[in-house]
């Protein structure tokens, strides 16, 4: 661990604010613990309100220069960041695992996701296209162009402490925005390490220093300041539905933009004809991977009543062979939850489930033997009825609900019968089932898959969901448009000035 920290420039006590340089911050001290063994691994001196003001001012100044640098040159900076990330992939992946607890292959995968995002953004930097429209007036040209937006705020969650930042930062970067990142206060070290990597690139180039800025602090202090700040044109926030609602309300009060990527309650429908081996693998990774702490985690399996018992048996067997333990060790597939508070949330949810009549068929306990700390729990499978209120909620832990369905209509009805709308999937070889699931009357989620699970999306698609998931889209496709402002331009190169819609106004 020492070597990883040294290579990434993490000290015992770290500054929690960066704006081209690290500030001598004066906010409260945040202690960072590893969920692997509950040990204190470092401290961060968080950003005070004054530190925040300095960062914002620098970001605003930098924006004035950055926006005028041609987009492909901005892309070149992101290209260099992508190269630096490749060099640090191993150490950064390890740090993600140490700080957050996901298994090492997922920690490394997360850094790979950043690298992929960098490559995507570099290409995008030459493709920020606007349309040309046919004007109804003679000798007129009409088109639209995209301008940089300003300073944007990026609020990221503990579960993807670095990749989700890159979805936003690399796109916003090529779009000409400068930004302020507020990471989760559970995972500030990975944010500091990433910012140090970025700093190396910025230092080597003739660009403003305060493009990729950082403020670390509690949501209730720095977070509040950020979401209420008129200087911030757009807030992109990842986290719980409750947090998102606060961000949305604060931004609305000041006419600020938002991209919200909030909770999921993701379901997989398994029809009677499905390839059960495929479905099993997808459910296992979706429900147990990242210890159930992805926003795309599979939380509900809507299973055809004819195959429910067979599938439940297979699933129990698969769950019992999942190696749980130190996520840094090879072969381990499930590490700890992020902290002790989350263990309480897990236990509390199980009490409620039992009260409501759910039947735990696997797991349900905190693991105390052969583990290094107190954050390890058993992945849990529960038979529930769709009308139990707990089914409506996202519990950020490895708890999976099995719900019986009679046919495709009931499957889709139950599937859509939750407030969240992020990711969804169906397992079937029946064309009619899969097309119905993908139709206007099918899944109401932002992501809908066939014979692929709910989690582990590629960066090329736009990522996000509907309903209480917040409606935002990040990462690939044309998600970049949210990070720019659109301008419609009409140019008259003729000798008359005709009005549109045939209106006459001559004196
Ligand atoms: C999240 O949990 O906030 O699709 C993001 C996935 C990952 C991203 C998850 N690529 O599971």
Image: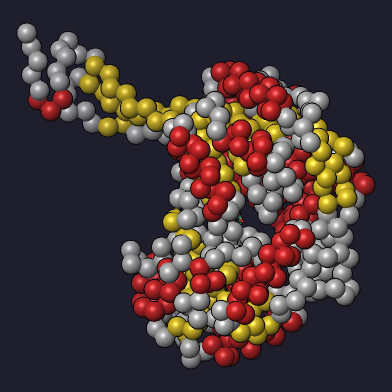
Which of 156/248 is in front? 248
**x and y percentages locating residue 397 in the rendered image:** 67, 66
- How many marks the image carries: the answer is 0
Q: Is residue 239 visible?
A: yes
**Is residue 153 something one can see in this rendering?**
no
Q: Is residue 453 above or below residue 404?
A: above
Measuring from the top left, give residue 495's x and y in whole percent: 17, 10
Quadrant in which ligand 1 is drawn: bottom right
Which residue shows up at 61% across the image and 65% down it? 395
Give the colouring mode of the picture. Answer: secondary structure
Vertical side of 335 occupied by 117: above or below = above
Q: Left or right of 490: which side holds 222? A: right
Residue projecting furthest to the top: 507
| Image quadrant containing the C terminus | top left
Residue 253 picture quarter = top left
The residue that appears at 49% across and 27% down in the rendered structure is 148
In the rendered image, the vertical position of residue 294 relative to residue 179, given as above or below: below
Q: Which residue is drawn at 79% across and 64% down?
A: 375
The residue furthest right is 2
Residue 141 place in picture, x, y as percent? 26, 23
Q: Which image quadrant for residue 16?
A: top right
- In the drawing, does residue 414 fall left or right of residue 492? right
Q: Quadrant of residue 442?
A: bottom left
Residue 490's spot in the image, x, y percent?
28, 22
Viewer-side residue, 372 vs 206 = 372
**Farthest residue toward the front?**
355
The residue sitting at 69% across, 33% down in the picture is 214
């Amino acid at each position: 661990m020492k070597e990883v920290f040294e290579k990434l420039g993490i000290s015992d006590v770290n500054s929690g604010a960066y704006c081209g340089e690290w500030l001598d911050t004066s906010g409260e001290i945040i202690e960072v613990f590893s969920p692997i063994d509950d040990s204190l691994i470092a401290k961060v001196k968080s950003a005070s309100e004054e530190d925040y003001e300095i960062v914002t001012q620098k970001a605003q100044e930098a924006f004035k220069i950055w926006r005028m640098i041609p987009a492909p040159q901005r892309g070149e900076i992101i290209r260099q960041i992508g190269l630096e990330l490749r060099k640090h992939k191993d150490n950064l992946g390890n740090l993600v695992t140490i700080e957050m607890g996901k298994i090492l292959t997922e920690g490394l995968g997360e850094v790979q996701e950043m690298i992929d995002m960098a490559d995507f953004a570099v290409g995008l930097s030459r493709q920020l296209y606007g349309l040309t429209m046919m004007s109804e007036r003679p000798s007129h040209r009409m088109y639209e162009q995209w301008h940089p937006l300003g300073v944007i705020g990026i609020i990221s969650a503990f579960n993807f402490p670095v990749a989700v930042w890159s979805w936003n930062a690399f796109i916003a970067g090529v779009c000409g925005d400068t930004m302020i990142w507020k990471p989760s206060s559970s995972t500030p070290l990975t944010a500091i390490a990433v910012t140090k990597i970025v700093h190396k690139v910025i230092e080597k180039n003739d660009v403003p220093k305060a493009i990729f800025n950082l403020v670390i602090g509690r949501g209730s202090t720095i977070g509040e300041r950020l979401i209420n700040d008129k200087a911030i044109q757009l807030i992109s926030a990842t986290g719980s539905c409750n947090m998102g609602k606060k961000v949305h309300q604060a931004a609305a009060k000041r006419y600020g933009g938002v991209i919200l990527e909030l909770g999921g309650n993701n379901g997989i429908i398994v029809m009677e004809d499905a390839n059960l081996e495929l479905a099993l693998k997808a459910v296992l990774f979706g429900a147990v991977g990242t210890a159930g702490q992805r926003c795309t985690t599979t939380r509900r399996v809507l299973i055809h009543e004819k195959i429910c018992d067979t599938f439940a048996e297979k699933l129990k067997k698969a769950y019992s062979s999942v190696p749980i333990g130190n996520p840094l060790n090879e072969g381990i597939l499930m590490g700890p939850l992020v902290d002790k508070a989350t263990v309480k949330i897990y236990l509390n949810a199980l009490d409620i489930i039992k009260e409501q009549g759910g039947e735990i068929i696997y797991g349900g306990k905190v693991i105390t033997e052969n583990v290094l700390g107190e954050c390890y729990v058993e992945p849990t499978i529960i038979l529930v009825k769709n009308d139990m209120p707990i089914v409506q909620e996202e519990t950020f832990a490895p708890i999976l609900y099995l719900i019986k369905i009679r046919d495709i209509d009931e499957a889709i009805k139950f599937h859509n019968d939750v407030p969240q709308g992020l990711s969804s999937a169906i397992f079937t070889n029946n064309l009619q089932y899969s097309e119905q699931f993908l139709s206007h009357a099918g899944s109401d989620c932002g992501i809908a898959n066939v014979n692929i699970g709910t989690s582990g999306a590629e960066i090329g698609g736009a990522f996000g969901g509907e309903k209480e998931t917040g409606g935002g889209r990040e990462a690939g496709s044309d998600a970049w448009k949210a990070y720019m402002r659109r301008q419609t331009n009409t140019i008259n190169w003729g000798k008359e000035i005709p009005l549109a819609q045939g209106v006459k106004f001559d004196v």
